[in-house]
Amino acid sequence: MIVRSESLKVGRPCKCISPVPSRYDHLSQEELIRLLEARDRRDATRFGLVWEANEIERDRAINSDFVALDLLPELSVGPGPWRNLIIEGDNFDALRHLRMTYAGEVKCILIDPPYNTGKKDFVYNDRFVDENDSWRFSTWIEFLYQRLIIARDLLREDGVMLLCINDENRAKLELLLDKVMPGRRIGSFVWRTKDSANDAGGNMSQVHEHVLVYANPRFQFAGKALSLDDYRNPDDDPLGDWTPQPLTKAETRLSRPNTYYPIQDPATGYWYPCDPNAVWRYATETRVEDTSQLRSDTIEELIRKKEIYFPACKPSEVMRWDTLEDLRKAIRAGKGPRLPKKKTPLFREDLPDLEFWVGKPIAPGRPSRKDYLKRKTKMVAPLSSWIAGKNEEVDYVFDDMENAFEVIRSERGGEGTDTINAILGNKAFNFPKPPSLMRALVTQAAPGPDDLVVDFFAGSGTTGHAVLQRNAEDKGRRRFILVSSTEATPAEPDKNICRDVCARRMSRVIEGYGDTPALPGDFAYLRCRRIKPGRMLDIEHAQVWTSLQMLHLDSLAAYADAPFLTAGDESQLVVYVPRYTPDCLAALKRAVKPCLSAVIYSWHPESIRQKVRYTHVEHAAIPESLALRFGLRA
């Protein structure tokens, strides 16, 4: 160490002070340069989330060992082959394997990651991170970043990622997602976790959480199919069935004075005033000189086409004032035309056109535009960002809402704990999400009957439960992949959340518990195992067979000791030859010859290629092909 001061010669080593060990001492010159370059790039960031991260450790983690999966039939449920998977292990490891086998195939990733509360709510690098950790927030962000950057590669072109988060960390997670999936933000849901108050300080009750939504370009929520019951033809309109839609838009008479005007029904002579806070959607010919420049019809043209509906009313309901003073008195008395739903008065004494209404017959209803069924190009109502309670009344807030919308409904947070207690007999997991919430999200985000749903923070398995419930409702064949860790620590070495909570819950759900009937389903139980760098030859045949099936098929069978194993059908056959001998050649040819497509994986691909020369058969080397897919060199 070089010390410079007035009492010491500049550049002269100070013998009284020992060199201080640096946390960078173990890094090579090349690694130090990469670290500095990464920090230069980070420091150049002008806007976004910045956090402390060890880029060297990150690089080593992603590009070091291979992750294999051990299939444990004794912990699996169902006779197999299994369509659903539960994976025990660090989700970083599991995600790396899933990227090798399911990249671009997942419709929905639905996760409830740790909320970084500081109450030992997540394990990173084999230890709990708690509130005393001075780098807790950076550690949490880095922990999620490493996983999300891999998870995004799993999504289909129409895939979506849904992430539950509390209010405190919502902004941080959203900024992180903007970095992981730039330009892919769809929006967010908000839901109330409890009915009781929760004073979090400042006399503010924090009882809401969020679900962030990031998706690939082709994704759309299922929404809700518009009810055809809303379409009728009471006036024998030659264009067919129609439903009334509001004529107004969210602009005031001051911001859009040209669309603030009265409308008259030519058939009855009745007049309809404009709402000064929500003017008409269409222009009027009385205020537009050149209508050819308009992008839509004028109100007069729509009336001539009979595409404006005027509601019927009794003559006794029609309002009329013969003098301006009579009209002013009526306004002060709270009388006069009002909006049907909000009951907001349409007349005020400060309006500039009150004299126009003197002597005019004023109808109480509101005209609307006919929305014809034959013109509909989209028969789905959009999804509201508000997640309502099960019995909460949800109504339109504005009279100018043009379309109905679908509302997700959920029980409060206590439903999750009650469900765990009912299934397992005790409170085996803290703060599980309500099954009704997760089922509603699955319904909207994975509407296809064969969609694949992944939860790599599976915890107690609520997402898997929701998938099976949704399948039971619509006879679907959706699959789930759940990843959960043991959460074992030196203090609790035998703790295993994945086996004893997640898998046990799913087992009870599939087999039935108490008075609750069984839900159709199964799962294979898998466990992550790391293979050290340069040791790919140590991979076991059962691990290879598991990976190959996950790579090519939508079900998984246990490994059997045989000359070769096959899975799939004649359209696509997957073959694994663990130990090639000439004795199995005839049977191997018979297996692949009638297929439209087949791929043979083996440790001796050239030897087999020389004997099995079919144009529809592909040959691949083990372990090289798996290592390359994983991003390693065998």
Image (cartoon, rainbow, N blue to C red):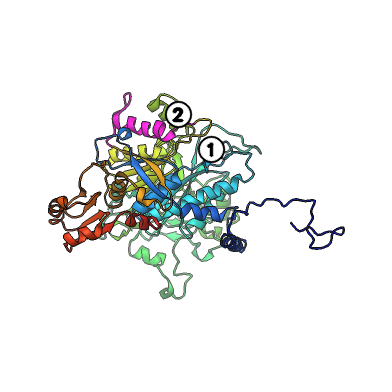
Task: Say which of 603 and 550 sits in front.
Answer: 603
Residue type beneath disc 2: Ala
Q: Residues within 10 Å of mark 1 (few under 14, many from 20)?
A: some
- In the picture, the disc for residue 24 is none
> Closer to the camera, 113 or 271?
113
- Left or right: where does residue 206 sit relative to residue 444? right
Residue sitting at x 29%, y 40%: 471
Question: Residue 262: image x %, image y %?
Answer: 47, 60
| Residue 553 in picture, x, y percent from top left | 26, 50
- Look at 54% across and 39% down and name the residue there: 127
Using a 10 Å C-alpha cutoff, classify the residue at mark 2 as few (fewer than 14 neighbours), some (14 to 19) or many (20 or more).
some
Distance, label 2 to label 1, CA atoms, is 15 Å
Residues rendered magenta in the picture:
493-521
403 up-or-down from 45: above or below: above
Residue designated by label 2: 428
* Amino acid type, mark 1: Asp
In the image: residue 598, left or right of residue 50: left
Q: Position of residue 427 (x, y in %)?
A: 46, 27
Residue that badge 1 annotates = 121
Seen at 44% across and 53% down, the residue is: 150
Give yes or no for residue 374 being in the magenta stretch: no
